[in-house]
């Protein structure tokens, strides 16, 4: 291993099976630069760089990889050289130079490597943009049909956008068999690593959940930050939770996700503690971290129970007053907050992002003849909702059990609206809310072909509106009033209890 000053930093002796490259803490690869070391090794036959050589070149970010052939008498033969390439129109990821005799090699190495790094920096998309957003490369590992894959990729891009990041590239991989540790093959993971280097990206986001072993293995293999879909969604929730209830539940979900992923990454994590009460065998640092996380989880669960009691008192107050409860549910970004604002003249935050609403908002909605209902706007659902989030938010979503009617709002402008309907129905069943009356409402009718609207409404026994344009909201209110108040006497129209909903 030779540094850029020409000094030999490491001499490694291997055998016929190969060599083991040690950790290189003094020479860390940067986002916009190579490692600062070139690796020169011997081949016992006159052969070019092998696939293992290319893999080491890519994963370790060497300035250059060289293989010097040696004949049976120990006389040097030809030397084979290769280096990584910046992003280019041909899509090539590395360059193999023509073989030379060592004494015929004439390269101004410092000038060459400086030019190469300048080109990397020129073509790379800088990690932190002017507006502070971070670049990410998405990896979709799928075995489904093309339509589902495209929908999954687009949804992952929207999640990245919502989290404040930028998707610079997306890679789809359909492995015949999932690797137990790396999820995908070493070769494909090597290509992804090189692609990240070409684009100046140090964050890889996978579209599926990674086990603790997979996440650690992929991160160690690529030397890049690796997160999965669940971690991305947790990050979004952490950014958007504002109420005490929401913040506690997000933190609880994050800790439950973190606990099995606490591993001893280095020797410092396994040191024994010292000081009063900490001498002797004691606990390792890793065990202490795990115990602290478990203790924090227990405290948060207790706080959630207390918050649940407060919600129960508020619920009992609503029941005593006999005011019906109406809740808007649906897939994320279906337009629930827009509809909530249109019906109640409120100003709940509305954005073209997933999970724009995280904390439940509640208002009163008045019908004709002074009839009133409580209407609430809830967090949006999403396919394959992480189990940690489902568990943590079960208390919040459990408030839907008090509803007398659920408005299931659907974005009919998205091609995957049928899958979205199925996802929401599945989650409602898991929450045991399938017995509550539901009204299916298609939103964003202004963005679809008008001839399609009656057909969809007949098929799903639904009505259509445009919450943003305010179209057909009167029809929606009449339908809601009819479903909530059909059995009410005009004089005692506020006498609806919650027995049906609770059952």
Image: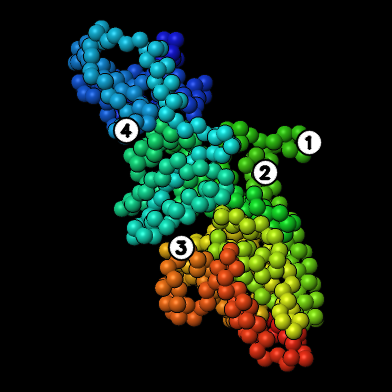
Q: Position of residue 230 (x, y in %)?
A: 54, 53
Q: Position of residue 87 (x, y in %)?
A: 37, 31
Q: Residues within 10 Å of mark 1 (few under 14, many from 20)?
A: few
Q: Secondary structure at mark 3?
A: loop
Q: Earlier in the sequence, mark 1 or mark 4?
A: 4
Q: Earlier in the sequence, mark 1 or mark 3?
A: 1
- Give the spatial CA distance, label 3 vs label 2: 48 Å
Q: Secondary structure at mark 1?
A: loop
- Of the two numbered discs 1 and 4 in the rendering, the one whose residue sits closer to the viewer: 4
Residue position marked by numbered label 1 in the rendering: 276
- Give the spatial CA distance, label 1 vs label 3: 62 Å
Quadrant where the N terminus sits is top left
- Of the two numbered discs 2 and 1 in the rendering, the one whose residue sits closer to the viewer: 2
Q: Is residue 356 left or right of residue 37?
A: right
Q: Is residue 444 left or right of residue 280?
A: left
Residue 41 against residue 427 in the figure, above or below: above
Residue position marked by numbered label 3 in the rendering: 414
Residue position marked by numbered label 2 in the rendering: 288
Q: Point out which mark residue 457 bears.
A: none
Q: Are marks 2 and 1 in contact (CB under 8 Å)?
A: no
Viewer can see residue 383: yes
Q: Secondary structure at mark 4?
A: loop
Residue 52 against residue 264 in the figure, above or below: above
Q: Position of residue 271 (x, y in %)?
A: 63, 34
Q: Position of residue 378 (x, y in %)?
A: 64, 65
């Amino acid at each position: 291993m030779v540094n850029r000053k020409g000094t030999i930093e490491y001499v490694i002796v291997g055998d016929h099976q190969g060599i083991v490259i040690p950790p290189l803490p003094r020479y860390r690869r940067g986002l916009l630069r190579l490692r600062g070391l070139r690796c020169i090794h011997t081949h016992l036959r006159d052969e070019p760089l092998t696939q293992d050589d290319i893999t080491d070149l890519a994963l370790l970010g060497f300035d250059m990889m060289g293989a010097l052939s040696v004949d049976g008498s120990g006389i040097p033969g030809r030397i084979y050289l290769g280096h990584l390439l910046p992003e280019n129109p041909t899509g090539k990821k590395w360059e193999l130079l023509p073989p030379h005799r060592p004494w015929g090699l004439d390269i101004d190495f410092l000038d060459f490597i400086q030019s190469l790094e300048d080109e990397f920096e020129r073509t790379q998309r800088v990690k932190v943009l002017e507006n502070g957003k971070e670049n990410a490369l998405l990896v979709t590992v799928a075995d489904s049909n093309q339509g589902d894959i495209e929908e999954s990729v687009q949804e992952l891009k929207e999640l990245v956008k919502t989290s404040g990041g930028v998707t610079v590239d997306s890679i789809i991989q359909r492995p015949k068999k999932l690797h137990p540790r790396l999820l995908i093959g070493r070769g494909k993971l090597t290509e992804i690593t090189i692609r990240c280097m070409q684009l100046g990206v140090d964050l890889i986001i996978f579209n599926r959940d990674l086990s603790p072993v997979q996440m650690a293995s992929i991160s160690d293999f690529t030397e890049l930050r690796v997160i999965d879909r669940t971690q991305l969604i947790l990050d979004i929730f952490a950014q958007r939770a504002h109420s005490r209830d929401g913040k506690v539940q997000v933190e609880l979900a994050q800790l439950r996700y973190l606990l099995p992923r606490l591993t001893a990454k280095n020797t410092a994590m396994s040191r024994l503690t010292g000081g009063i009460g900490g001498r002797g065998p004691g606990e390792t640092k890793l065990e202490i971290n795990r115990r602290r996380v478990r203790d924090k989880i227990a405290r948060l669960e207790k706080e959630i129970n207390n918050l649940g009691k407060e919600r129960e008192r508020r619920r009992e107050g609503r029941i005593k007053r006999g005011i019906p409860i109406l809740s808007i549910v649906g897939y994320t970004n279906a337009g629930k907050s827009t509809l909530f604002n249109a019906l109640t003249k409120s100003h709940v935050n509305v954005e073209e992002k997933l999970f724009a609403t995280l904390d439940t908002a509640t208002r009163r909605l008045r019908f004709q003849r002074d009839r009133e209902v409580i209407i609430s706007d809830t967090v949006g659902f999403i396919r394959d909702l992480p189990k940690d989030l489902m568990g943590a938010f079960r208390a919040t979503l459990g408030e839907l059990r008090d509803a007398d009617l659920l408005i299931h709002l659907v974005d009919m402008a998205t091609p995957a609206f049928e899958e979205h309907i199925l996802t929401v129905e599945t989650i409602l069943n898991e929450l045991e809310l399938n017995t509550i009356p539901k009204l299916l409402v298609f939103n964003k009718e202004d963005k679809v072909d008008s001839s399609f609207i009656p057909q969809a409404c007949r098929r799903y026994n639904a009505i259509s509106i445009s919450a943003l344009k305010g179209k057909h909201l009167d029809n929606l209110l009449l339908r809601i009033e009819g479903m909530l108040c059909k059995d009410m006497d005009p004089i005692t129209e506020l006498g609806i209890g919650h027995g049906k909903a609770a059952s």
